[in-house]
Image: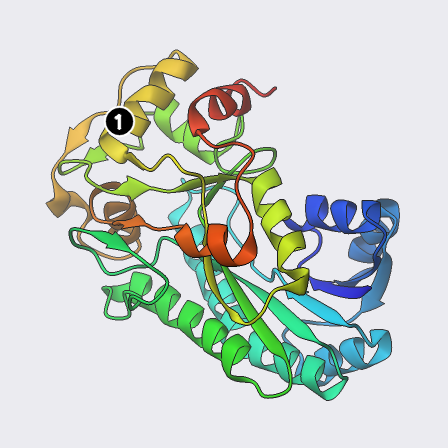
Amino acid sequence: MRVFVAGGTGVIGVPLVQRLLAVGHDVGVLARSPGSAERVRRLGAEPVEGDALNERSLQYAVRTYRPEVVINQLTSLPRNLLNLYEGMRSAELTNRLRSESTPVLVEAAAAEGAERVITQSISFAQQPGPGVRSEEDPLYLDAPGVHGDVVRALAAAESATLDTAGVEGIVLRYGAFYGRGSYFAAGESYPRMLERRALPIIGEGRGIWALVHIEDAVDATITALRAESGVFNITDDAPVAAAELLPWMAYALGTSQPRRVSRSLFGFGPLTILRYLVDEQPEVSTKRAHSRLGWAPRHEDWRHSLARVLRGE
């Protein structure tokens, strides 16, 4: 199968490309620069020149490769969550990639006769409140400030993927990635924030985290190569409240326990996103992914696997 990956050099992109190649697919990866093209070649895939934010360039890249399946993993996430300025710039660019580039990518795929498009989304963008959210429940479109911009860009990417005629559109709402290169990895943002006591328990810490090991996210994406249209939550089977997760991580790191702080301190700007993650996000269901995709995580419970990731193993 000819598979075109946009966003093939990121945290999930690299292991995904490697797995696609390992199971025998021909893989082309969007490459904007010579450096990016060289990284793609080192993976063993074919670099396809193009700029995700240039409509004609992106269309030409898809037309050149003529894929059967397009996988959209386009993001520009900040490496350092402690830097609010970097976070804001990265969020703006990622919003553009989702809201502007995704429709172009999907329409180009349809025009070239691709069978399906698989688009990355996230499971932690649901309306706050009690209860378990399924894929049918509405996203948190009226979230405050920057947070709302992020969710609306996600909704635009999902809509473009699902509503474009001529292709099967699949949306994978991944949980919070952990594994190599993720925010949870040794030396990365979450461990450093905990060590600096900059990742507190906000309010009651009621936010329910749905984690997914990157290897499991890759498995789900490979499974989706032959899936029918739909939205699927891709997380492990052990949801956990932030009030339990963050102290557990601090203990595993051998650092001080996180502080408890008032919600009012995180009521403005991008800080509302962290407040949502720690004190507001609801639990999500993965029943649809199990029943319709036939997918289940190999890392069913984050505790053992995450401890290894935090140690850099």
**Residue 112, placed above or below residue 74:** below
**Residue 78, placed above or below residue 67:** above
Q: Which residue is drawn at 56% across and 85% down?
A: 164
Amino acid type at mark 1 = Glu
Q: Which residue is drawn at 78% across and 55% down?
A: 36
**Residue 175, placed above or below residue 157:** above
Who is closer to the viewer here, 150 or 3? 3
Q: Residue at x 26, y 27 (%)?
A: 244
**Image quadrant in which you'd find residue 106:** bottom right
Q: Which residue is drawn at 58% across and 21% down?
A: 312
Label 1, secondary structure: give it.
Answer: helix
Q: Is residue 39 left or right of residue 100?
A: right
Label 1 crowding class (10 Å Cα cut-off): few <14, some 14-19, many 20+? some
- The answer to whether residue 27 is seen in the rendering is yes
Q: Quadrant of the N terminus?
A: bottom right
Q: In which quarter of the image is the C terminus?
A: top right
Who is closer to the viewer here, 191 or 154? 154
Coordinates of residue 241 in the picture (x, y in percent): 26, 35
Where does label 1 land, which residue?
A: 244
